[in-house]
Amino acid sequence: MGSPLSSILANLVIQDLKCSIFKTLTIHIPLYYRYDIIIRARNNHINIILCSFNSYHERIKFMVEYSDNGVINFLDVKLLIDGRIIFDNYRKSTNSGRYLNYFSNHPVEHKRGVVIGQLDRILFLSHSKFY
């Protein structure tokens, strides 16, 4: 933690995990995304896939989240599954909606960065029907 090598090592471990698990699985997985791993699979295959991932190393354990009415919250994105996957912004129920106060003693670049960052989230992480 905190080392510049942490993210590189984490990527190497997850890449090795993926390669070793997918070599042993005989189940077809139509959707796989990395980092916080998201997999779409049939209900009767989920426990087999979960056991395979959890058997990789004793200190790395995965959990399963099932879609609720075709919606899964994944990191800060809401995945809506309706024939295809579309994205929307996701905010936890505890989100206060408060950002950097404009009248605070921060540089103007930081204040602009907050606005630009939020616009980028809207434009790049969500489907146009949610604008």
Image (cartoon, grey):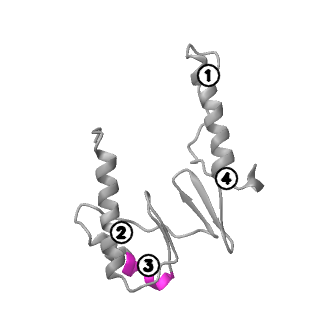
Residue 75 located left or right of residue 13: right
Q: Can see residue 1?
A: yes
Q: Position of residue 41 (x, y in %)?
A: 50, 78
Q: Marks 4/1: CA distance?
A: 25 Å
Dot 2 crowding, Cα within 10 Å, few <14, some 14–19, many 20+: some
Amino acid type of the residue that numbered disc 1 sits on in the rendered structure: Asn
The residue positioned 39% from the left and 77% from the top of the image is 49
Looking at marks 2 and 3 on the same chain, the residue that comes earlier in the sequence is marked by 2
| Residue 99 at least partly seen | no
Amino acid carrying label 4: it is Ser
Residue at the extreme left of the image, as rendered = 58
Mark 2, residue position? 18
Nearest to N terminus: mark 4 or mark 2: 2
Q: Earlier in the sequence, mark 4 or mark 1?
A: 1
Distance CA(mark 4)–CA(mark 2): 27 Å
Q: Return the disc, 4 or 3, that comes first in the chain's sequence.
A: 3
| Range covered by the magenta-colored residues | 42-49
Judging by the rendered image, the residue that carries numbered circle 4 is 126
The local secondary structure at tag 4 comes to loop
Q: Which residue bears the numbered disc 1?
A: 101
Residue in the foreground of this view, choosing between 24 and 41 = 24
Q: Is residue 93 above or below residue 52?
A: above
Foreground tag (2 vs 1): 2
| Label located before the other in sequence (3 or 1) | 3
Looking at the rendered structure, the kind of residue marked 3 is Ile
